[in-house]
Amino acid sequence: MLILTVFVFITLSLKGGAYVYYFENYVNESRLAAFLDKLPAFLRLSEHTATAGFSLFNAGGIVFMIVGIAFSKGLADRFGKRDVFGTGLFLSALCLLAFAFYSPESVYLIFITQVLHGFFYGLTIPLLWAMIADVADYSELMNNRRATGIIFSAMIFGLKAGLSIGGALVAGILGAYGYDESLVVQSPEVIQGIKMLMSVYPTLTFMVSVGCLFFYAIDKKMEVKIENELVERRKK
């Protein structure tokens, strides 16, 4: 769970850092302006086209992330936290990968994919911390003592480490492709790098997190077993 947490937050930092560069340098400005002009005026959050597009893109993902959170508990109660978390993370990773195939003119697809990504990732948000609590229960079951404090402290460390590493990677990747903030128009290599930063690189780090779940033994059956055995033990 610690490794998983680190890579989840590396991903969040990577894709979050890529958004502004993606809209300023990759998305076609005229197509984006035409798309924004068809929307109600209150949804245009800035007079600058790229900034307005980025803001709406980010807001749309957050709104549908909240919708995903609302569905999370019901699905987890039925299928188990691990399986719902893994499925949501995998599908959200596929949405990120889809950006690698979109042209600068594919504005509608870009926004639709962000909405789907927000929903699928939203399914995982409450489950991450619930799964960490299950680890504390598992520790109590196996070792006859709870280690809630040290387990959650480790995960907070993983969160901060992931955000820090992800932020450094954004700067490092842009630098490796030759990004120059003083240029109005970036080179084709830089544009390709920004596209990769938005799609392939965060997909890879999300997939590492999905891979970690193959070693995470607390499925729905184990959840019920842990809960029942701890209840009986505490009664005694």
Image: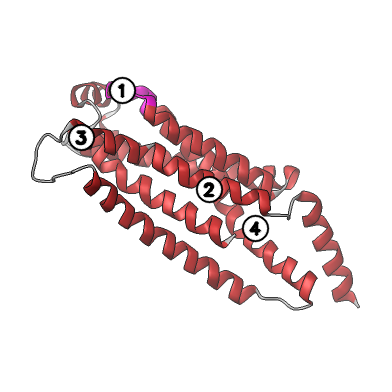
Tell me where residue 44 appears, x and y as whole percent.
25, 34
User: Residue at image x 23%, y 24%?
Assistant: 37
SS at mark 2 in the image: helix
Q: Secondary structure at mark 3?
A: helix
Q: How many numbered badges does the structure rendering display? A: 4
Residue 171 part of the magenta-drawn span: no
The amino acid beneath tag 1 is: Ser
Quadrant of the frame with the N terminus: bottom right
Residue that carries the numbered disc 1 in the rendered image: 103
Dot 4 corresponds to which residue?
A: 131
Q: Nearer the viewer, mark 4 or mark 1?
A: 1
Query: Looking at the picture, which amino acid does disc 3 mark?
Result: Asn
Residue 73 rendering spot, x and y as whole percentages: 66, 48
Work out whether residue 37 or residue 76 is closer to the camera in this orientation and state it: 76
Mark earlier in primary sequence (4, 2): 4
Callout 2 crowding tier (Cα within 10 Å): few <14, some 14–19, many ≥20? some
Work out whether 148 lies above or below 178: below
> Which of the two labelled residues, at mark 3 and mark 1, occupies the earlier sequence position?
3
Which range of residues does the magenta coloring cover? 101-110
Any magenta on residue 107? yes
The residue carrying mark 3 is: 25
**Between 66 and 214, which is closer to the camera in this rendering?**
214
Report the amino acid beneath label 4.
Met
Q: Which residue corresponds to mark 2?
A: 208
Residue 133 horizontal side relative to residue 190, left or right: right
